[in-house]
Image (spheres, helix red, strand yellow):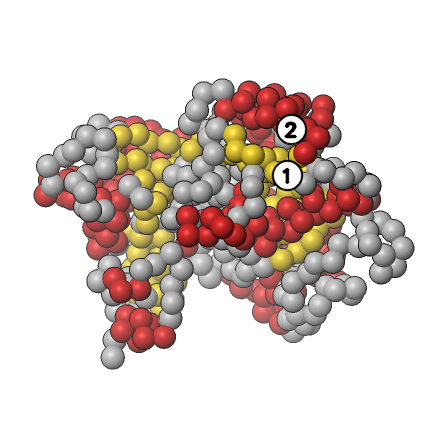
Amino acid sequence: MDWIARDAAVVWHGFTQMSCFGANEPLIVERAEGHELIDTEGRRYLDAISSVWVTTLGHRVRELDEAIVRQLGAVAHSTMLGNGNTIVVELAEALAEVVPVERPHFMFASDGAAAVEQALKIAFQYWLNLGVTGRQAFLAVGGAYHGDTIGALSVGDESFESAAFDPLRFDVLRAPGYAEPGWATAAAQLVAEHAEDLAAVVLEPLVQGAAGMQIARPDDYGILDQACRNHGVLLVCDEVATGFGRTGTLFASERCGLTPDLLCIGKGLTGGYLPMSATAASSRVYEAFLGEDLGPRTFYHGHSYAGNALAAAVALRHLRLLEERDVLANVRARSRELRTLLEQRITPLPAVAEIRSEGLMAGVELHTGTPGERRGRLVCAHAVRNGVLLRPIGDVVILVPPLSITSAELMQIVDALSEAITAVTAQQAPVSA
Ligand SMILES: *Cc1c(COP(=O)(O)O)cnc(C)c1O
């Protein structure tokens, strides 16, 4: 039996209709080198989506491999519940130096959704601990994506094919999305109107990735930030996608002038090596949880693999490597090149409605084709056949290359994309959106 058949016989893939899994020509990865994934037939694919936004410096990075091997010689995992681990302390100390959060404490978890879930529960209990009743609601932004657990789904937008779970969602105040001019003013107004009910505002600073790369202007955020401060509403920044240099600064909050009360990090934290996420709480929030042992102010929440030592070791080495290799400079230079390439080569194609990019996150929105055409999927499948791994969100082709991508590789990605759009739309009469 081939690998695809063996896979389909026993594995259930996320966000995937399994009846079509094999027909959609999935890549079954056997190993990887640098920015390339290598399949069971030895074919190589340039990973232009960074394994859905987690890989930062590519695969089998010597320093990162070594950090894990070294930690294996000490301990792989020990619990964070009431006890600690030296490598986790070192990681938290290093993160505390760089996150845009005032005197942070880090609660670790394994997935981005869990980091968001923790932030929501911390924000909720914060007000209870202060003896304030009624501050139980959340305000979130149109188009938001915060993960797939129930709380994260609730603050997330109702799109993303998740309507089946509507009965499980709690109600959220919804501000307009980033594409709407004046979204931030409207959000700030909602904060003022509902201040007495609001525990926190939750947002993805600068870029909403899963919304198909919707981008806000950095100076949009001032008015909303001010409204939160005026009314004491907590601000939660979800930087699971934008953190660790993706948009050209270590955190997008810096660009937006935001110092959140709670910050969620994940994806790039370990360079894409191991599952680890964290919720960073400011001293304002953290101190509201201090009280007597086993008392009601305690945050009764924690995951079994939180603060995994192997993940912490690779995350710490990765953070240092970002600096040693001046990775942010590469992100800024390559993001300008990517923008120019997209404008010159992709924007003029008749099938392309819009391109949006910020740092090394880009979305190429195609005009919707004929009903049932699945144009985004066809374009990406074509690129994959030409050795560039792409994945769409609907009819938006997503480009999220590793932060260490080179000029030549960007050219290869844009060549493959241009070729794919042209080939796919030549077979179908172009239909305007
Ligand atoms: C991916 C993502 C999440 C969820 O992270 P998982 O690790 O997939 O649970 C949350 N928020 C944002 C902004 C994301 O991009």
Left/right placement of residue 353 relative to residue 311 reads left
At horizontal 48% and vertical 28% (from top left) the residue drawn is: 176
Contact? badges 1 and 2 (CB < 8 Å) = yes
Left/right placement of residue 4 relative to residue 84 reads left
Nearest the eye: 322 or 106: 106
Q: Which residue is mark 1?
A: 137
Crowd class of label 1 (few under 14; some 14 to 19; many from 20; radius 10 Å) = many
The disc at residue 89 is none
Among the 4 quarters of the image, the one containing residue 73: bottom right
In the depicted structure, whether residue 218 falls above or below residue 136? above
- Which secondary structure, mark 2? loop
Residue at the outermost bottom position = 1
Q: Position of residue 283 (x, y in %)?
A: 78, 41
Q: Which residue is mark 2?
A: 194
Which quadrant is home to the C terminus?
Answer: top left
Q: Position of residue 118 (x, y in %)?
A: 65, 51
